[in-house]
């Protein structure tokens, strides 16, 4: 019981890795094992018979943090965000993964996906078709599809850059054809 009291006293200074007693580099399987070990040890149902309400509350708080730690560390994106947070200068304020942290992680993932391809489904579809046309050397078709993608997402820089590449090739081809006509 003294170990429990000591852990609970330090709970607000411990990060999730310390709570589960694993290294930061721990594999997902090790995190899962640690969660099950801690969960079995500190599950509130194991302490139902105690009369000491303060001790029961400590067990409940510790179990809640063990569950919270597992919830964050088992998810790669949340784990990356959390590890970055606790490695920074604001470690003390970032020990708990809050709803705002989760929203931050979701927003970062969404931004990453959007930056890769785009936000609008039709825009992405036209962009992908246009990129495939460009890869196959169908430049006019690529230009049409990329212009259509830009109608859905006019501010998308990736779409604009790809269209500029295609238009540059089209311009070079038309110059070559113009030169071929002049030679005859």
Image (cartoon, helix red, strand yellow):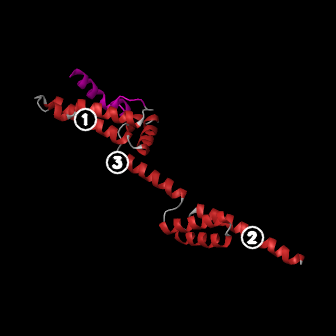
Q: How busy is the neighbourhood of tag 3: few (under 14 within 10 Å), some, or many (20 plus)?
A: few
The numbered mark at residue 63 is 1
Farthest residue, direction right: 183
**Is 171 left, or right, of 40 in this rendering?**
right
Q: Is residue 138 in view? A: yes
Q: Quadrant of residue 44?
A: top left
Q: CA distance from mark 2 to mark 3?
A: 51 Å
From the image, tell me which residue sits under label 2.
171
Report helix, strand or loop for mark 1.
helix
Describe the element under mark 3 as helix, strand or loop. Answer: helix
For the residues carrying marks 2 and 3, which lies nearer the camera in this image?
A: 2
Magenta-span inclusion, residue 129: no
The answer for how far apart the CA atoms under marks 3 and 1 are is: 19 Å
Q: Is residue 12 above or below residue 109?
A: above
**Residue contact at pointers 2 and 3, CB within 8 angstroms:** no
Q: Residue furthest front?
A: 136
Please give the name of the residue rendered at 44% of the width and 53% of the height, measured from the top-left corner: 107
Vertical comparison of 117 with 64: above or below: below
Q: Main secondary structure of the magenta part?
A: helix
- Mark 3 vs 1, N-terminal side: 1
- 10 in the magenta segment: yes
Q: Badge 1 local density, few (<14 within 10 Å), some, or many (20+)?
A: many
Whether residue 154 appears in this view of the structure is no
**Residue 32: quadrant of the picture:** top left
Q: Earlier in the sequence, mark 2 or mark 3?
A: 3
Would residue 147 appear left or right of 108 to someone viewing this image?
right
Q: Which residue is mark 3?
A: 99
Span of residues in magenta: 1-23
Q: Nearer the viewer, residue 78 or 184?
A: 184
- Which residue is rendered at x = 39% and y = 51% of the image? 103
Q: Position of residue 9 (x, y in %)?
A: 27, 27
């Amino acid at each position: 019981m003294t170990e429990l009291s000591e852990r609970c006293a330090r709970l607000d200074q411990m990060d999730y890795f310390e709570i589960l007693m694993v290294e930061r580099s721990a594999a997902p399987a090790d995190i899962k094992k640690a969660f099950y070990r801690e969960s079995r040890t500190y599950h509130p149902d194991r302490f139902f018979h105690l009369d000491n309400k303060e001790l029961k509350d400590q067990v409940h708080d510790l179990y809640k943090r063990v569950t919270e730690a597992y919830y964050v560390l088992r998810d790669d994106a949340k784990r990356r965000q959390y590890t970055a947070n606790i490695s920074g200068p604001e470690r003390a304020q970032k020990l708990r993964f809050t709803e705002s942290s989760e929203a931050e992680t979701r927003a970062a993932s969404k931004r990453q996906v959007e930056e890769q391809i785009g936000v609008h489904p039709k825009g992405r579809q036209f962009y992908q078709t246009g990129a495939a046309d460009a890869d196959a050397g169908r430049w006019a078709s690529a230009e049409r599809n990329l212009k259509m993608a830009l109608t859905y997402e006019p501010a998308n820089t990736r779409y604009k850059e790809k269209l500029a590449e295609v238009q540059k090739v089209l311009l070079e081809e038309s110059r070559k054809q113009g030169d071929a006509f002049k030679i005859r």
